[in-house]
Amino acid sequence: MSAGFDLGPRRHPRRMSLTPMIDVVFLLLIFFMLASRFGTDSVLPIAGGTEGAGSEWQGAPRLVDVTPDATLLNGTAVPVADLPAAVGDLLPPEGGAVILRPRDQADVQRLVDVMDVLRSGGVTNLILID
């Protein structure tokens, strides 16, 4: 007579499930697909000055202050739609630069909108300052 315990039918060792690992891989795949950039980036060409070299200013002052509520040309409020014509009257015949200055917490989208209006009106030489 053998003295032993009856443990019932023998169990096979439990296999690891791959389902949680596959779920994590798919979640990472979805995350990186949504976080990646699709398409091309748009570039805003802005003149940064002449990097220390002096250049002679020509014509009347052309300072455009961009605020969250208004657009000011040399301190005078001008509607954004009328800005290219107003700036064009101040530009010398050979062209010149227009200085853009964001003020009073103006967001970047507002600044880009003003730049797009100026570019569509034929003003291409823009200088952005703080």
Image (cartoon, rainbow, N blue to C red):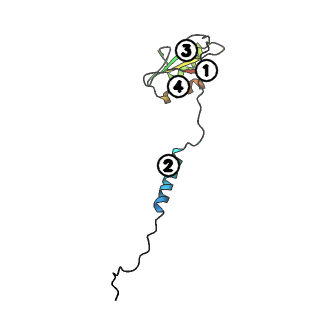
Farthest residue toward the right? 94
At label 3, counting other C-alpha atoms closer than 10 Å, the crowd grade (few under 14, some 14-19, many 20 or more) is some
Under mark 1, the amino acid is: Asn
Alpha-carbon span between mark 3 and mark 4: 14 Å
Q: Amino acid at mark 2?
A: Phe
Q: Quadrant of the N terminus?
A: bottom left
Q: Which residue is mark 1?
A: 125
Q: Disc 4 and disc 1: Cα gap in Å?
A: 13 Å
x, y (%) of residue 108? 49, 29
Q: Amino acid at mark 3?
A: Arg
- For marks 4 and 1, the one nearer the N-term is 4
First in sequence, mark 3 or 1: give its number: 3
Q: Give the label, 4 or 1, closer to the camera.
A: 1
Task: Give whichever of 122, 29 is nearer the camera.
Answer: 29
Task: Residue at 42%, 22% (x, y): give it.
Answer: 104
Q: Amino acid at mark 4?
A: Val
Residue at numbered disc 3: 62
Q: Which numbered disc flags the more N-terminal residue, 2 or 1?
A: 2
- Secondary structure beneath dot 4 equals helix
For disc 1, the neighbor class at 10 Å (few under 14, some 14 to 19, many from 20) is some
Q: Is residue 116 above or below residue 61?
A: below
* In this picture, residue 94 sits left or right of residue 6: right
| Residue drawn at 54 percent across, 20 percent down | 83
Separation of residues labelled 2 and 1 (CA atoms):
40 Å
| SS under mark 1 | loop
| Image x and y of residue 77, in percent | 47, 17
Within-10-Å neighbours for mark 4: few <14, some 14–19, many 20+: many
Circle number at residue 114: 4
The outermost residue toward the bottom is 1
